[in-house]
Amino acid sequence: MRILIAVAAAAMLAGCGADVATSAATAAALRKQEIQEGQKTMQQMQQKVQGVMQQEQERADRGTTDN
């Protein structure tokens, strides 16, 4: 009887471990996706800033040639 209880307890604990591992893997996958989306947003913003800086430089260059 004790062996049966020990086996049942071990099975329940193993199941809890699997749930924890699954939850950790899911959380890691979500975090990876958040990081990738953040990097994409950062690249888009850098491109916009570069575009604005280029426009400003072109305006400055036109201003010096107009005088």
Image (tube, rainbow, N blue to C red):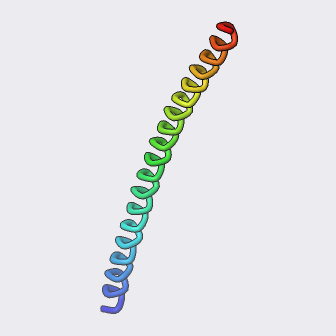
The quadrant of the image that shows the C terminus is top right
Residue 30: x and y, percent? 41, 52
Name which quarter of the figure residue 14 lies in: bottom left
Residue name at image x 55 percent, y 23 percent: 51
Residue name at image x 61 percent, y 15 percent: 58
Name which quarter of the figure residue 47 lies in: top right
Residue 59: x and y, percent? 60, 17
Compared to 13, does 66 lie above or below?
above
Q: Left of 35 or right of it: where is 63?
A: right
Residue name at image x 45 percent, y 48 percent: 34
Residue 60: x and y, percent? 65, 18
Residue name at image x 36 percent, y 67 percent: 19
Residue 44: x and y, percent? 49, 32
Residue sitting nearer the eye, 60 or 48? 60
Residue sitting nearer the eye, 4 or 67? 67
Compared to 25, does 55 lie above or below?
above
Compared to 23, does 6 lie above or below?
below
Q: Left of 21 or right of it: where is 43?
A: right
Compared to 29, does 4 lie above or below?
below
Residue sitting nearer the eye, 7 or 33? 33
The quadrant of the image that shows the N terminus is bottom left
